[in-house]
């Protein structure tokens, strides 16, 4: 296993362990020792890589962002409907984990993750976006909050619509503003 694969393995083990523990009890009741035992990592590893449990969540979300971006065709630009459809596919695949994070008051992590992806896609010129809006103060915060709120509601309702239909709806809602 390469050093990067080993690092990813330990991160995934830590994240999975945290989710398993969160399914049983609230985050304030989880100890670092308990997490490390569940993940099969040392406390030294934890303290060398994370300052708290939120950093495990953010690190895994960043890993997921990279995976998401690699799944997009190279150098192909994506329109808003395509971007939203891809997001709802990701949300559907990660539904249980996202709902668990929301239940534990970590919706901000989902919003931050979405903002990072969107900024990265903009920086790489991979989104067909209206430039004046994307550079306006608070636009990305507004956009991310709206999409995540819609996504969480959709997940809580049991995902009755397909990700494609949700992508179309989100795009339509955002374009009509």
Image: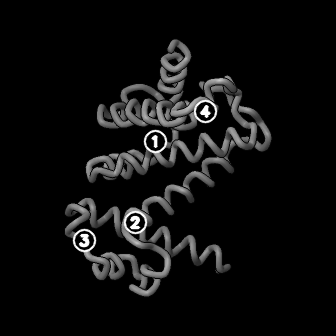
Circle 3 crowding by C-alpha within 10 Å: few under 14, some 14–19, many from 20 = some
Question: Of label 4 and label 3, which has the lower sequence position?
Answer: 3
Please give the residue where the numbered disc 3 appears in the rendered image.
30
Please give the residue where the numbered disc 2 appears in the rendered image.
16
Residue 130 percent location from the top left of the image: 67, 23
Question: Of label 3 and label 1, which has the lower sequence position?
Answer: 3
For label 4, the SS is helix
Q: Which residue lies at the image location 46% right of the left edge and 41% below the top edge?
A: 91
Please give the residue where the numbered disc 4 appears in the rendered image.
83
Residue 117 percent location from the top left of the image: 59, 45
Q: With respect to residue 50, does 26 lie above or below?
A: above
Q: CA distance from mark 3 to mark 2?
A: 14 Å
Residue 52 percent location from the top left of the image: 37, 70
Q: Which residue lies at the image location 67% right of the left edge and 41% below the top edge?
A: 121
Q: Which mark is residue 91?
A: 1
Q: CA distance from mark 3 to mark 1?
A: 26 Å
Q: CA distance from mark 2 to mark 4?
A: 27 Å
Hey, which quadrant is residue 160 in on the image? top left
Left or right of residue 151, residue 157 in this image: left
Quadrant where the N terminus is found in the figure: bottom right
Q: CA distance from mark 4 to mark 3?
A: 36 Å
Q: CA distance from mark 1 to mark 4?
A: 12 Å
């Amino acid at each position: 296993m390469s050093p990067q694969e080993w690092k990813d393995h330990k991160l995934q083990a830590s994240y999975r362990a945290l989710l398993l523990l969160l399914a049983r009890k609230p985050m304030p009741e989880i100890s670092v020792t308990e997490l490390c035992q569940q993940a099969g990592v040392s406390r030294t590893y934890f303290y060398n890589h994370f300052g708290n449990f939120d950093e495990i969540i953010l690190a895994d979300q960043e890993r997921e962002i990279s995976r998401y971006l690699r799944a997009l065709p190279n150098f192909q630009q994506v329109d808003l409907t395509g971007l939203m459809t891809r997001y709802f596919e990701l949300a559907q695949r990660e539904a249980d984990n996202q709902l668990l994070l929301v239940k534990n008051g970590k919706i901000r992590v989902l919003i931050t993750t979405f903002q990072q992806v969107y900024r990265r896609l903009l920086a790489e010129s991979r989104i067909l976006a209206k430039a004046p809006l994307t550079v306006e103060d608070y636009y990305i915060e507004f956009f991310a909050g709206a999409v995540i709120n819609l996504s969480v509601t959709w997940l809580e309702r049991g995902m009755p619509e397909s990700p494609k239909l949700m992508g179309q709806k989100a795009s339509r809602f955002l374009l009509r503003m």
